Image (tube, rainbow, N blue to C red):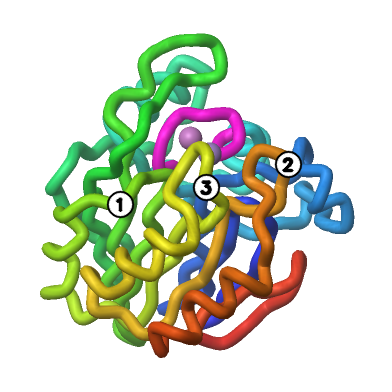
Amino acid sequence: MKLTWYGHSCMGMEVAGLQLLFDPFISGNPMAKSIKVEEVPATHVLLTHGHGDHVADAEAILKRTGAMLVGNAEICGWYEAKGIKRTTPMNIGGETDLGDCRVRLTIAQHSSTMPDGASGGDPGGFVIFTPEGNFHHAGDTGLMLDMQLLKRYKLNYACLPIGDNYTMGYNDAVEAARYMGVTTVVGMHYNTFPAVTINVEKAKDAFRAAEIRLVLPMIGETIEL
Ligand code: NI
Ligand code: MN
């Protein structure tokens, strides 16, 4: 499958004929000036939680593309009130089909408030089961033992926050990868703004020492995973 990196926790996965877009935060991201939001493709927009740095461009992209919104029931309800009709409301532990793929909503240790202060329900992450392998997008989270449960999904890779402060940092992300049994991690939620700025070389060293591959695509770059 192909991963296109849009910065922060936003990425698009092209798999099984679908364009899965996670946590669109592009127009407000100073690092993503080169990305044209109006050209980002999506058949599905998946939102891990309600924070602005994960949902800021969701409404515009949903309205332009007619993509299906996938998220918890509170987030879907918030967008339904804005006129978004195609939604897949879920809650923690549930799975549903997305074309030839399947999605499971998992827990995250974080918070989830919508940009207007409304409840965004519980924060989450997604496991995506595809004909080309399975992967996890963790959303924003701290390290937690429940990550060990993800090992049974035989994940090809996991997208994990590494920026610290609002989420786990890279050392905890190494541990999270061990818990999940993944050997490839796509690092996210780092170097977007000062509070999540890290020393990337030290992050690479931490993953190298654990013999886990850390993938850090450039903004706009598409890689095969
Ligand atoms: Ni957050
Ligand atoms: Mn965040």
The residue identified by callout 2 is 193
The residue identified by callout 1 is 143
Residue 163 placement (x, y as % from top left): 56, 52
- Image: 134 above or below 64: below
The residue identified by callout 3 is 164
Which residue appears at 80% of the width and 52% of the height? Answer: 32
Amino acid type of the residue that numbered disc 1 sits on in the rendered structure: Leu
Residue 167 placement (x, y as % from top left): 45, 44
Of 160 and 212, nearer the camera is 212
Q: Earlier in the sequence, mark 1 or mark 3?
A: 1
Quarter assignment of residue 73: top left
Q: Earlier in the sequence, mark 2 or mark 3?
A: 3
Amino acid type of the residue that numbered disc 2 sits on in the rendered structure: Phe
Of 22 and 86, nearer the camera is 22
Magenta-tinted stretch: 47-55
Quarter assignment of residue 145: bottom left
The alpha-carbon separation of the residues under discs 2 and 3 comes to 12 Å
How busy is the neighbourhood of tag 2: few (under 14 within 10 Å), some, or many (20 plus)?
A: few
Q: Are marks 2 and 3 in contact (CB under 8 Å)?
A: no
Residue 182's tag is none
Farthest top residue?
A: 117
Which residue appears at 56% of the width and 87% of the height? Answer: 224
Dot 2: element = loop
Q: Is residue 221 left or right of residue 135?
A: right
Q: Is residue 87 left or right of residue 145?
A: right
Residue 222 placement (x, y as % from top left): 68, 78
Q: Earlier in the sequence, mark 1 or mark 2?
A: 1
Which residue appears at 45% of the width and 75% of the height? Answer: 185
The alpha-carbon separation of the residues under discs 1 and 3 comes to 11 Å
